[in-house]
Image (cartoon, rainbow, N blue to C red):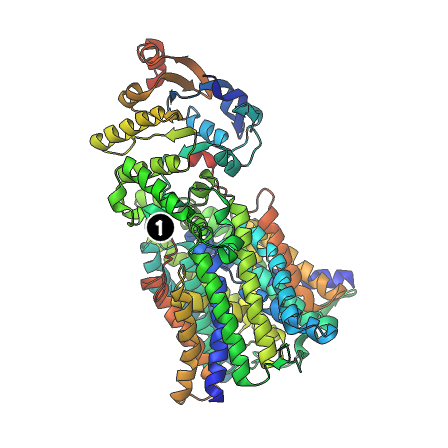
Amino acid sequence: MGNILRLEGLTKNFDGLKAIDNLDLGVEAGKISAIIGPNGAGKTTLFNLICGYLYPDKGRIIYKERDITLLDPWRRAVSGIGRLFQDIRVFKKITLLENLLVTFNDNSENPFRAIFGRRNGKERKKIETVMKWLNFVGLADKKDHLAENLSWGQQKLLSLARLLCGDFELLLIDEPVSGVNPDMADTILEKIKELKGLGKTIIAVEHNMDAVEAISDYIYFMDSGKITAAGLPEEILNNQKVMDAYIGI
Amino acid sequence: MNYLLHILIMISIYTILALSLNLPVGYTGLLSLAQAAFYGIGAYVMTLLMMKMGINFFVCMAIAIVFSAAVSLLVSYPSTRLHGDYFILASLAFQIIIFTILYNWIDLTRGPYGIPGIPRPEILGISFDNLYKFFVLSGGLALGVFLIAKRLYSSPFGLVLKAIREDELSATSIGKDVKKFKILAFAISSGMASVAGALYASYVTYIDPTSFNLDESIFILSIVLVGGSGNLRGPVIGTLLMILLPEGLRFLGIPDSVAPNVRQIIYAMVLILLMRFRPWGLAGEYRFG
Amino acid sequence: MLLQFIVNGIVSGSLIAIMAIGFWFIYRATNLFHIAHGAVYTASAYVFYSLYVSKDISLSIALVLSLISSIIFGLVMYFIVYRPLEKKNASAGIKFISSLAIYIFMVNIIALIFGNETKILSEGLSESLSFGNIILTWIQVYQFLSFLILFILTYSFVQGTKSGRAIRAIGDNPVLFKAIGLNERWVKGMVFAIGSAIAGLASILTGIDVGIDPHIGMLALLNAVVAVIIGGIKKIEGIIIGSLLIGILQNLVIWQFSARWESAVTFFILILVLLYKSGGLFVVKKRVEEI
């Protein structure tokens, strides 16, 4: 399979500080890539550039052979780039069911259709899809609860389900197991591995090396806004130089 | 009986206003102090078209809806760039500007002198020229707005607005064009408000800018906050309460000279207590974060 | 003529500046959008009226008592209404609405007691001075001098004292402020006391010139808010410049068009600044890396 995402010479400065420095990266479709690196290496900034919450000073972002460098963030999402935020960001005061129902982007969201149109059978089909994904993450029995009543780990699962329900193809997952207990971490990692089986491409930022080792096909090591090493997990995790750079020796 | 009909007509007008403001406030999470401006735009556009060009009330009202929806861009655009206090402030500034225009563009609006002798609506030979008939009209329009609001609130559109209210960035990340939805919410909201304005003008048959000032905007917002927002029943309950309360005061024998002040004092105390102990209002859903 | 209007503008700008400094103290330390500051303004003018005009108490004693009353109004508002909301971590919207409600509450109490008509605080016309073509009344001179003195005092307080620096520190990072064990309650109480006293001063200085009615507070407050936003929240010098600019601009509008368009122009500028503020003006951007 080819590259679903290519970054070419990406550069982003904050007040003269190079957060991302002439970065090149190709992400192979259908694989799980992990980006590791010390705090402040620019990992989240990189995600924000790919999602369009920031625009680069230089360089290009190519998604499915299309230049999306200057595309609006919501259009990138529609075209299949999904994001799991480090701080989760589920819609807290609506139900789990509604959290997933809202992910469908179609013309039923047109207010004039809502007022004058007829309700059709589509709604039932959508609810079926939603229930499928709620089942997938094991939250189906809580479908009518408000999202704010879930535990932190459950909220992570819900936002994973949101990515699936929205049918995103490239998933940018920021710290999937931070702040959850070990059992929940195992569940989440298990689900992420299953996603690969569903044909999703995943880029994960993660600090927990066991988690990285458990899920990733490739590892990119990032430092000071650059990818300084890349390779298979066993290559990177056993590379003393990389690991020293990580813990800052 | 006339008194009762008058109350019912006022309730139908304010139900429309409350349901309209519910869309930006309770669904999209944008506190706006500009609703009386759209109410006033509706009243003035309808009145001027009807009196200067002799167009039928219902056509005038339709034009007023479109006009007011277009003007709402001046509020919805800031809402895409400003948050919290700054958006409230921008909406307040817009309200004051519209009021100043209505008050000072004397060639067009007669300013503080107001416009008297506004005719009652007519359609197909039926004239809504007494209280009974007018109540049928205003009640019918209020019911229409209620049904539209009901469909909107429970639609995928309403759900997207709620998602934006909860977390704009998150809504963007699942592919929602937040800007477009805010613009639509305000456009529909101000269209509805201008229906109320047209009704009010043709009911009272006289308008002047003071009916559409900042105090009125605060009053409409109070209705939504007291009743509660983010669902259908909150604004309706708020309207009933806020319109009937002053009538209740009248029965308590509070003299007319101080009644407006006493009323405002009660509203203000209710708001302070609600914001502290029950920010979702009496029957609302949205809890203000 | 132009020069006369600019001089008038500077004087009315200095009145706006006084109110803006008071609002700034509170906003800078608490991030509260204190609309009810306008009610403190109105109330202290009425206290002054009841003492000085109705009870014939001497000017200086009436002034001091009025300022003490405004401090009490401010502190009561903070500790009865705002502080519980802060403890509940209430949103900006809830605080804004509460503040608006306090304003409405107080203004209507005042209207109930004193009626809606304008009250005069001083009789007779003030004598005037002329410098060439420019005419100033003595009241205008006092207004401007009060502003200058207040500015110097507050500037040296904010820059030069520990309490003054605490105001900035608490506004910039309330969590850290609490964490290092500084007394947050005391600092916030202090800014409400100072800010409210300054509002009282502003209203009495203005009221002596043009009289008072129960609704003067809103416009005074909004002018101050516009000044603060135009000038930028971080520094007190900025809001002085903002206030003087608005004062001059409003007087030029009065001169060229009419007083009726004054507020439309002011608020139009407010919207523009809110939307397209350049560097130095406020709206603190959240850095996107933090998402």
**Residue occupying image coordinates x 32% and y 55%:** C88
Instruction: Residue C97 in the image: state x and y as whole percent.
Output: 43, 62
Instruction: Residue A53 in the image: state x and y as whole percent.
Output: 50, 35
**Please, what is the three-letter code of the amino acid marked with disc 1?**
Ile
Instruction: Residue C153 in the image: state x and y as whole percent.
Output: 51, 55
Closer to us: C41 or B78: B78
Q: Is residue C78 left or right of residue B113?
A: left
Q: Can residue A216 be spotted in the picture?
A: yes
**Residue occupying image coordinates x 39% and y 83%:** B248
Quarter assignment of residue C224 = bottom right
Q: Which residue is mark 1?
A: A94
- The answer to whether residue B236 is above or below residue C27 is below
Instruction: Residue B140 in the image: state x and y as whole percent.
Output: 51, 73
Circle 1: element type: loop
**Residue occupying image coordinates x 34% and y 42%:** A128
Closer to us: C52 or C78: C78
Residue that protrudes farthest toward the left in the picture: A183
- The answer to whether residue B57 is above or below residue C9 is below
Q: Is residue B121 left or right of residue B261?
A: right
